[in-house]
């Protein structure tokens, strides 16, 4: 029996990812179809839904979100249940060869009882965490927030979050931000997904420039070469991985790859192929080791729960 398809909703099943490392895009694109995929297993995956993975740059912490299924009593046909809200968790390990530790839920001032929290992205220095929430003072639907920590070795030391404000967020869905430090520049970019005014499909990929010295943002621009008439949920600006439901995939959401031309413009994405994508859902790739490894969620058969977190290794890199 085919597993339940997880579609993108503005609340509950909206996923994204975070970039790690630089990728040699030309050689990667040539070898995109040779992947070995494994389920991360316990304690990361459980009978609940696990998604939104973000592997840190050193590979020693994995942020993700978990959605439990809670009982709502009984009805005419027996017991009834419904999915709870997404909350952000983190798991750590002592070395790249060590097993993952038991996941810990981030503090209550990050995770709310009445909202969805997911999609972590860290600044290069590790002091700032960006994430998405429908609560915490949202202007409407999902907004993008940030939180600071002084101790970058403490994965639970995040302070009170703040909304990025009207320069970034709108009354529509603004979600799944990726903080990207531009090369040879003091400026940064925020890549994110939105259905704000100017969106050409159901959801498009957008970019806003950011000056961390002044806190000023540029006007949002739609990355039309990556956006499609369907749902485009993620563009990783460092490794070039794309999560989209555009035509030409294997079914549902797939993981694709985009390169840049000599002028830095994004090109139309190419599907990573059947060794990583299936007729089920493959979503929100978070790369590690220069894109040689990707962490991603999928609802393919053989998992621990419905949505599990997997990792894929490119055998050609």
Image: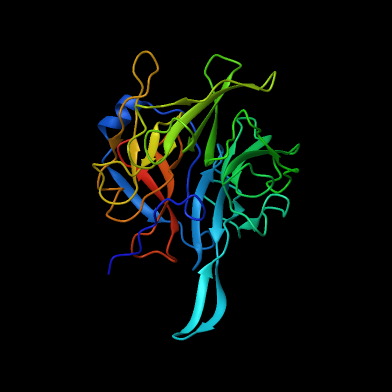
97 relative position to 38: left or right: right
Q: Is residue 118 left or right of residue 14?
A: right
Give percent across and percent down for residue 231. Answer: 38, 42
Does the image show residue 286?
Answer: yes
The one of 58 and 80 positioned closer to us in this rendering: 80
- Look at the picture and state if 215 lies above or below 311: above
Q: Please tell me how many numbered marks the rendered image carries.
A: 0
Name the quadrant of the N terminus.
Answer: bottom left
In-front residue for pair 76/302: 76
Quarter of the figure with residue 184 = top right
Whether residue 211 is visible, yes or no, is no
Residue in the picture at 45% in, 56% down: 40
Relative to 158, is 298 above or below? Answer: below
The image shows residue 238, relative to residue 132, as above or below, that is above
Specify the quadrant of the image occupied by residue 112: bottom right
- In the displayed structure, 248 sits above or below 88; it is above
Colour pattern of the rendering: rainbow
Give x and y (percent) for residue 146. 66, 38
- Whole-percent x and y of residue 165? 66, 33
| Left or right of 22 on screen, residue 274 | left
The percent coordinates of residue 310 (x first, y second) are 42, 53
Q: Quadrant of residue 260?
A: top left
Q: Quadrant of the C terminus?
A: top left
């Amino acid at each position: 029996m085919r597993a339940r398809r997880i579609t993108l909703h503005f609340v509950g099943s909206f996923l994204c990812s975070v970039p790690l490392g630089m990728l040699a895009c030309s050689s990667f694109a040539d070898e995109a179809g040779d992947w070995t995929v494994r389920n991360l297993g316990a304690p990361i995956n459980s009978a609940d839904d696990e998604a939104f993975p973000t592997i840190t740059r050193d590979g020693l912490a994995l942020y993700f979100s978990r959605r439990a299924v809670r009982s709502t009593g009984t009805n005419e046909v027996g017991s009834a249940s419904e999915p709870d809200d997404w909350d952000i968790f983190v798991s750590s390990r002592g070395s790249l060869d060590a097993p993952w530790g038991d996941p810990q839920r981030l503090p209550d001032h990050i995770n709310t009882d009445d909202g969805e929290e997911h999609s972590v992205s860290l600044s290069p220095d590790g002091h700032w965490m960006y994430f998405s929430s429908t609560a915490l003072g949202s202007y409407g639907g999902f907004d993008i927030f940030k939180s600071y920590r002084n101790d970058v070795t403490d994965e639970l030391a995040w302070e009170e979050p703040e909304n990025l404000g009207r320069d970034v967020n709108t009354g529509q869905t603004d979600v799944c931000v990726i903080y990207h430090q531009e090369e040879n520049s003091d400026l940064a970019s925020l890549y994110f997904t939105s259905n704000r005014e100017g969106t050409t499909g159901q959801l498009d990929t957008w970019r806003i420039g950011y000056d961390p010295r002044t806190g000023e943002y540029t006007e949002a621009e739609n990355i039309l070469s990556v956006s499609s008439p369907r749902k485009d949920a993620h563009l990783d600006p460092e490794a070039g991985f794309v999560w989209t439901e555009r035509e030409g995939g294997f079914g549902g959401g797939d993981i694709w790859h985009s390169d840049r031309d000599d002028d830095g413009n994004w090109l139309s994405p190419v599907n990573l192929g059947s060794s990583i994508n299936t007729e089920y859902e493959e979503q929100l790739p978070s790369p590690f080791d220069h894109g040689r490894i990707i962490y991603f969620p999928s609802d393919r058969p053989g998992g621990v729960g419905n949505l599990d977190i997997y990792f894929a290794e490119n055998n050609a890199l």
